[in-house]
Image: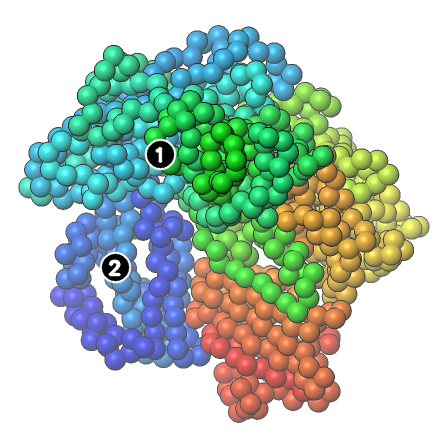
């Protein structure tokens, strides 16, 4: 112990003089900053190094964990002292200390030594453990205003199910008065509300979240959210209030409102535990029980699909404050059943981001006006209005207009927001428990301010963009205007569909169609830190997997579509997300625990696919969804479904083989390797034409997927690639591949050094594609390449070009054996008329930057490589190949190693740091 203390003192004394040279930032536990509610069973620590010196590598770390901040300030690690560990590892380090207690805040910091002799100590961070066991809830019960009749419960309705009854349910208020008897040390609220909730203390909403908690497979689980409410409480009387909404938990069958799905897990309910810890060491628990009171609230209708109605006349002022006196509207709550397990919400919550002022577009008649927000996005409205008591304002949001009116036909109709005024001055309102995708607002029953009418006056009208709060970690720009516009187009579709799952669209379905979660995840991860959100998607997959091993196309699975048999439930390109997504999470974030968690599910799915295969060929599913053919887009037209499904099956097997080896299961790995060989033989026998040197119909998707998945035998690869390119060229550089195939077209062309073809395909506006959509006025990526007006105009399933912007044009990639970008590959592509490009990506190790400019005289590349990583830099060859770094010949810098010429590139090996390369 004396030795450890001495070591810490040495660390601290040396840090003072070296602090400017080495710093520690980005402390995370389980991929989250200051997480609350995490399981105390498995913890993993990560941090980033900021180094002023080049070629900096961590050589040791020392983690200290304590249960009191004062202990840690004195470097007393009474929970875990890792000791000095000689290791360069700075991500996903497993906790190996004492057993942690539930509902407890812990503090930690790390001390690091680098290869230059610098020593740094991080600032203190914290994490808070949740309630992993049922007994940790201290007897808290599920409480509700009313109970749904068992005969009406339907956790997986068919899409053609007929309603047995009609009408809206009560959206209740729940309240509990309690006293804080002594001086508080801390107060933590653990709360789950189904489908969604808002919690308030003494009249103040807790947190800035929207649609808490995230939606899951409710017959199996619910999520709870943890709030630190210490500052919200006061000594003496306090009130905890909760509002409940339906979400996906219950979709009310109300005539005249859109209702895509008919899920009915139950009526809204809530469970909570409020832990009061006093300075004298005592503890008190306020739990949800039969003593709570409940009343109907002012929200008279709420549906995730149909909108929300609010009657301000029904407000009960101060209902969530101690001064409120409950009248006969209030009754004691019902004790009801809930899901079998309650888990913490670990993904970032949904929140409000951009605000858009609605600009008056035109007047339809003497009672209706249309407004334009200028941007199609997921969101809600905020209205300020003044009028008489009982006046009613109804607002119809839409993506597009038809005959100057809001057109909801492609996106679910009717959906509207309705507000009934109480007549008390200027009133402000925004919905709480629903959202939609829209750009336009058709207002009925209220007029723009200063309009000569007896209607209520609209003082202000805004659109509020809502999305998952995942932090932005990347940005891209270039000299090509169309590419910049395309990047923004795709980004808005990503943001609009990044909720508590990756949705297909923010209006008519809002479902977690799974193919997007592996095909688009690289594009998403270049831009947003979705480590926790994507891990939550993996949990949803595991929860939705069927007993026979099938992973349905939607997770959480809320509906079974009947059209086309099992076409919309059993498609390998969708279900394989259960294998591919965990692997990508490992490759991008170093997350091995997600592999361990998902491995049994992966095995069951492979067993299922094997049972469905006919001679190792799969034939079910949707294939290359929404490709371009002669017919209206939908099920694959250009490519046989068996080809895409079997190619993904083979890809699964190769990934699973690597995962098995990583998890120490060599026998499993050998089994998957042997099966993969058999699938490859069958695939080529079934689909490959030796004469034509292409697969099946020779479509872009068919040849690209065969190449990407390494199903093409080596002697035929060049010919198949050439056939892919020629198909694109003969169509005047037009694309045909759809949802499944297009990513692989881009990946194969980039890897083959044919980004010139990618440029030619995507630098135009005259054929279906990104430029075509922009030319038609799209502000978010549309569902169809053709930007059809009768389908969704906010889908992100076809946004694969964004990945190329980062990995190709800007050139930020990983080496094949790299994990979490610890071995970086900078390979900028100079193509077409692009004269400059820049991208930054804040990886698990730190910021990676690649910024290049092409001049007639030279090529300039500015890169930043984070500490604790290395990079290979591939510079385009110049006339003389003389290379300078900030004006100095690189031969004078021993830290820059010239590895010679590879093809048309000069390869440099560098360590961390900032470099300004010029090659002449």
**Quadrant in the picture for the N terminus:** bottom left
Between the residue at mark 2 and the residue at mark 1, the CA separation in whole angstroms equals 48 Å
Q: Earlier in the sequence, mark 2 or mark 1?
A: 2
Asked where in the image residue 644 lies, by quadrant, the reply is top right
State the SS at label 1: loop
Residue 683: image location, x then y, percent: 78, 42
For the point 46% across and 69% down, the residue is 866
When the figure is inspected, residue 744 is found, relative to residue 386, above or below; the finding is: below
Q: Is residue 774 above or below residue 388?
A: below
Disc 2 on helix, strand or loop?
A: loop
Q: Residue at x 55, y 90 (%)?
A: 887
Asked whether 424 or 684 is in front, the reply is 424
* Residue 738 drawn at (x, y percent): 74, 44
Label 2 packing within 10 angstroms: few (<14), some (14-19), many (20+): some
Q: Nearer the viewer, residue 632 or 387?
A: 387
What residue appears at the point 62 percent right and 86 percent down from the top-left corner? 883
Q: Eyeballing the image, is 186 above or below 325? A: below
2 or 1: mark nearer the eye: 1
Question: In the figure, 582 relative to 164: above or below?
Answer: below
Q: Residue 864: x, y in percent?
A: 50, 73
216 sits left or right of 114 in the view: right
Which quarter of the rendering shows the C terminus? Answer: bottom right
- Res 342 visible: no
Q: Residue 425 got which mark?
A: 1
Which labelled disc corresponds to residue 124?
A: 2
* Model colouring: rainbow
* Neighbour tally class for label 1: few under 14, some 14-19, many 20 plus, Cα within 10 Å: few
Is 566 left or right of 467, judged from the image as shown? Answer: right
Front position in the image: 841 or 819: 841
Q: Residue furthest front?
A: 452
């Amino acid at each position: 112990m004396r030795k450890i203390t001495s070591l810490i003192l040495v660390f601290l004394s040396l840090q003072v003089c070296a602090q400017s040279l080495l710093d520690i930032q980005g402390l995370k536990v389980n991929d989250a900053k200051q997480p609350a509610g995490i399981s105390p069973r498995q913890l993993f620590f990560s941090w980033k190094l900021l180094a002023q010196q080049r070629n900096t590598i961590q050589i040791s770390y020392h983690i200290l964990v304590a249960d009191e901040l004062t202990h840690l300030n004195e470097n007393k690690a009474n929970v875990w002292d890792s000791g000095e560990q000689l290791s360069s590892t700075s991500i996903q380090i497993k906790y190996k200390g004492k057993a942690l207690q539930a509902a407890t805040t812990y503090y930690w910091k790390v001390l690091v030594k680098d290869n230059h002799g610098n020593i740094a100590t991080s600032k203190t961070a914290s994490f808070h453990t949740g309630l992993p066991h049922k007994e940790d809830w201290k007897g808290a019960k599920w409480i509700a205003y009313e109970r749904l009749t068992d005969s009406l419960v339907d956790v997986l309705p068919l899409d053609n199910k007929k309603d047995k009854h009609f009408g809206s349910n009560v959206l209740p208020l729940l309240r509990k008065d309690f006293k804080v008897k002594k001086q508080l040390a801390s107060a933590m609220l653990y709360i789950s509300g189904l489908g969604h909730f808002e919690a308030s203390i003494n009249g103040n909403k807790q947190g800035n979240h929207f649609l808490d908690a995230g939606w899951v497979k409710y017959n199996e689980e619910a999520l709870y959210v943890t709030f630190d409410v210490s500052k919200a409480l006061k000594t003496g009387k306090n009130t905890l209030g909760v509002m409940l909404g339906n979400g996906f938990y219950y979709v009310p069958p109300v005539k005249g409102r859109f209702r895509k799905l008919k899920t009915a897990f139950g009526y809204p309910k809530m469970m909570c535990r409020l832990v009061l810890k006093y300075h004298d060491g005592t503890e008190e628990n306020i739990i949800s029980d039969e003593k709570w009171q409940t009343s109907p609230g002012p929200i008279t209708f709420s549906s995730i699909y149909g909108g929300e109605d609010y009657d301000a006349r029904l407000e009960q002022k101060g209902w969530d404050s101690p001064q409120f006196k409950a009248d006969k509207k209030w009754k004691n709550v019902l004790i009801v059943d809930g899901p079998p397990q309650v888990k913490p919400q670990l993904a970032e919550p949904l929140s409000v981001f951009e605000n858009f002022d609605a600009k008056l577009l035109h007047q339809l008649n003497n009672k209706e006006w249309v407004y334009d927000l200028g941007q199609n996005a997921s969101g809600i409205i905020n209205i300020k209005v003044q009028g008489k008591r009982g006046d009613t304002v109804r607002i119809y949001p839409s993506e597009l207009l038809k005959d100057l009116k809001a057109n909801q036909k492609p996106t679910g109709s009717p959906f509207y927001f309705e507000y009934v005024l109480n007549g008390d001055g200027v009133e402000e309102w925004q919905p709480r428990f629903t959202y939609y995708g829209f750009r336009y607002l058709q207002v009925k029953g209220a007029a723009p301010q200063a309009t000569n009418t007896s209607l209520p006056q609209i003082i202000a009208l805004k659109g509020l963009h809502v999305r998952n709060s995942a932090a932005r970690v990347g940005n891209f720009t270039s000299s090509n205007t169309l590419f910049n516009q395309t990047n923004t187009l795709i980004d808005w579709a990503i943001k609009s569909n990044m909720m508590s799952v990756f949705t297909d669209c923010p209006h008519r379905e809002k479902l977690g169609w799974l193919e997007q979660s592996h095909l688009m995840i690289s594009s998403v991860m270049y831009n947003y830190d979705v480590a926790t959100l994507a891990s939550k998607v993996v949990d949803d997959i595991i929860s939705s997997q069927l007993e026979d091993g099938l992973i349905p196309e939607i997770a959480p699975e809320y509906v079974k579509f009947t059209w086309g048999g099992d076409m919309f439930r059993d498609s390998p390109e969708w279900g394989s997300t259960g294998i591919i997504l965990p692997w990508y999470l490992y490759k991008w974030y170093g997350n091995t625990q997600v592999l361990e968690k998902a491995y049994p599910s992966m095995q069951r799915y492979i067993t299922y696919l094997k049972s469905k295969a006919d001679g190792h060929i799969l034939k079910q599913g949707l294939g290359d969804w929404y490709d371009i053919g002669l017919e209206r887009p939908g099920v694959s037209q250009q490519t046989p479904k068996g080809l895409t499904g079997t190619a993904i099956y083979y890809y699964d097997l190769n990934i699973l083989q690597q995962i098995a080896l990583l998890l120490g299961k060599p026998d499993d790995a050998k089994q998957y390797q042997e099966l993969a060989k058999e699938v490859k033989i069958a695939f080529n026998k079934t689909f490959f034409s030796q004469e034509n040197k292409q697969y099946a119909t020779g479509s872009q998707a068919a040849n690209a997927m065969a190449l990407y998945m390494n199903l093409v035998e080596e002697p035929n690869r060049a010919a198949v690639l050439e056939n892919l390119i020629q198909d694109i060229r003969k169509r005047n550089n037009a694309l045909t591949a759809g949802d499944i195939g297009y990513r692989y077209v881009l990946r194969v062309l980039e890897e083959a050094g044919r980004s010139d073809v990618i440029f030619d395909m995507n630098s135009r506006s005259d054929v279906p594609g990104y430029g075509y959509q922009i030319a038609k006025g799209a502000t978010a990526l549309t569902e169809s390449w053709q930007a059809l007006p009768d389908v969704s105009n906010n889908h992100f399933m076809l946004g694969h070009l964004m990945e190329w912007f980062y990995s190709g044009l800007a050139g930020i990639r990983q080496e094949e054996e790299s994990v979490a970008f610890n071995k970086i590959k900078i390979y900028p592509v100079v193509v077409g008329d692009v004269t400059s490009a820049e991208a930054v990506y804040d990886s698990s190790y730190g910021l990676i930057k690649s910024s290049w400019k092409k001049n007639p005289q030279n090529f300039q590349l500015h890169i930043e490589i984070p500490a604790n990583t290395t990079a290979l830099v591939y510079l385009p060859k110049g006339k003389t190949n003389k290379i300078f770094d900030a004006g100095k010949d690189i031969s004078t810098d021993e830290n820059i190693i010239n590895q010679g010429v590879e093809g048309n590139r000069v390869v440099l090996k560098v360590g961390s740091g900032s470099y300004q390369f010029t090659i002449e």
